[in-house]
Amino acid sequence: MIDILPQATTKYSLDYYATDPIFSTPVAELRNKAKSIVASLRGRTIWMVNSTASGGGVAEMLPSLIALMNNLGIRFRWAVIRSDRQEFFSFTKRIHNLIHGDTASGTELGAEDARLYEAVNFENVASFKKELKPEDILIVHDPQPLPLGQILSREMGITAVWRCHIGLDRHMEATKTAWRFLKPYLDEYRHTIFSAPEYIPDYCADRSTIICPAIDPLSHKNQELSVTKLTGILCNSGLQTQYEPIVTPNFKHRVAMLTENGSYVVPNSLGLLFRPIVLQVSRWDRLKGWNSLLEGFVRLKSSAFVSNNENKIQRKKKRLELARLILAGPDPGAVADDPEGMDVLRQIQQRYAALDPKLRNDVAIVFLPMKSHKENSLIVNAMQRCASIIVQNSLQEGFGLTVTEAMWKRKAVLGTTACGIRRQIRDGIDGVLISDPENPAEIADKLGLLLNNSLRRYKMGRNGQRRVYDYYLIFRQMSGYINLLEKLI
Ligand code: UDP
């Protein structure tokens, strides 16, 4: 039942990273640190277990992390639990929302839910057990596979660690309900990992570690792109009309754009190479603040249209007039089994269709193909590099890898004060923070400020990249795991 994924590989080995002058020091430090435990871990496998091989932050990080850990000499593997029971994912989404203090999908977690939770995890245990040795270590990600670690730790005495990627910096009835429900499963876990101290429930306080998520700077999502390569990606994916012959063939799966009547077309001319672009790339999740971002942008543009203030510098006016908002997320085919995602998408579509036609032309709702991880990553990379401002208007955010990716690309980022984002962005230094992501007026103001000040955008982008270099590159995350493994053995 459980999927054991083929051994992950990266385009480059750790040796390659080490030869890059920018990464040589962090890699050398990492190797030094790993020396002491490589021998003691020989013969043991560290299993990463989660519930999806693609989409979202966890699936984004695991391939590079696993491949580079193996490169270091520590055997890591990846297993993904499976279930064809739709109600299981609706229920785990409810836990996810409650941990974020959001009660839109329900406020209760009861005995019936627990039965479903355990049954699905039990179904995955049998096939997984055949792969495991008692001395292996499980690192179980997020709530979906949590009971699996409990069962295996009971049945085989295996060491289980829970890695939680979500959380809220406040406690309220909703969060308490979720943590109460999860407690019995967590009791069997030896240790827990969180992204911020604020997220740790009381009963885990004496067995938890903070490890920040991180990005791989040489992955398809984050590697530098030459102008030719970037243009090639835009043309190959359907984001830009091709005026000249190019070396690479079209991607197997093309980008689609929503039209006013609800159908999709290949965009071809989004203006990514020409216009000031304001971009948000995320899953179609209510907590990503899509609607208010769209309203904020509409407000910003409306102010530009009515402006006939002669004192305004022409260039600024033009910039505002040409600015285009791109809301990009997974192709609806990839979200079809996520009723909440479809609902969010419908709401955005309705608002888009109701926009004044002139304004509608300045907004694009774009669907990214998810079938090829490489193509998807290259498309996101190219789009992020074309943006003047990258927004992450999340109502709640455990961490927010999209923010890290944008900072690494030296972009001005407009984030929110959601805990995961404000831990990354120092307001006014590495980006700008919106205090109320549901207030279009504030969003419009801050977008306008950033758009009209290219020097400020440049400085923030530079600071942002430095901050990612210091705290959020994969080497630091690997080092966090090594510290923890040392403790466990
Ligand atoms: N992402 C992507 N394609 C999409 C939407 C998102 O590749 O259509 C990626 C995005 O670049 C980031 C990850 O998915 O790497 C989302 O991680 P984040 O921590 O921002 O949010 P999560 O989805 O985990 O809540």
Image: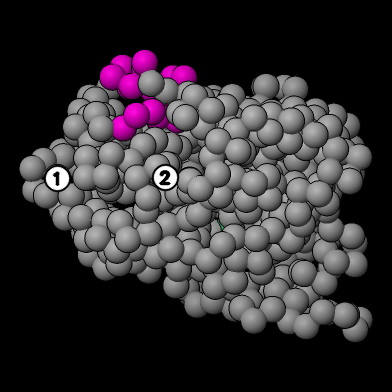
Q: Secondary structure at mark 1?
A: helix
Type of amino acid under label 1 = Ala
Q: Residue furthest left?
A: 111
Residue drawn at the location 83% of the way across and 39% of the way down: 23
Residue bounds of the magenta highlight: 189-206
Image spot of residue 91 (x, y percent): 23, 50
Residue 185 falls left or right of residue 219: left
**Can you say whether 30 is above or below 119 in the image?**
above
Q: Which residue is mark 2?
A: 136
Type of amino acid under label 2 = Asp
CB at disc 2 and ligand 1 closer than 8 Å: no
Among the two numbered marks 1 and 2 on one chain, the one whose residue lies closer to the N terminus: 1
Look at the image and tell me whether residue 423 can be seen: yes
How many badges with numbers are in the image? 2
Image spot of residue 111 (x, y percent): 8, 43
Which corner quadrant of the image does residue 446 belong to?
A: top right
Q: Which residue is mark 1?
A: 114
Q: Secondary structure at mark 2?
A: loop
Q: Which is closer to the viewer, label 1 or label 2? A: 2
Look at the image and tell me whether residue 277 can be seen: no
Residue drawn at the location 84% of the way across and 43% of the way down: 18
Q: Is residue 55 magenta?
A: no
What's the distance in space between the residues labelled 1 and 2, CA to CA? 27 Å
Image quarter hosting the N terminus:
bottom left
- Crowd around label 2: few <14 · some 14–19 · many ≥20 (10 Å): some
Residue drawn at the location 66% of the way across and 69% of the way down: 375
Which corner quadrant of the image does residue 313 belong to?
A: top right
Tell me how the rendering is colored.
Answer: one colour
Residue nearest the observer in this picture, 28 or 38: 38
Residue drawn at the location 63% of the way across and 77% of the way down: 254
Residue 161 falls left or right of residue 73: left
**Can you say whether 378 is above or below 95 in the image?**
below
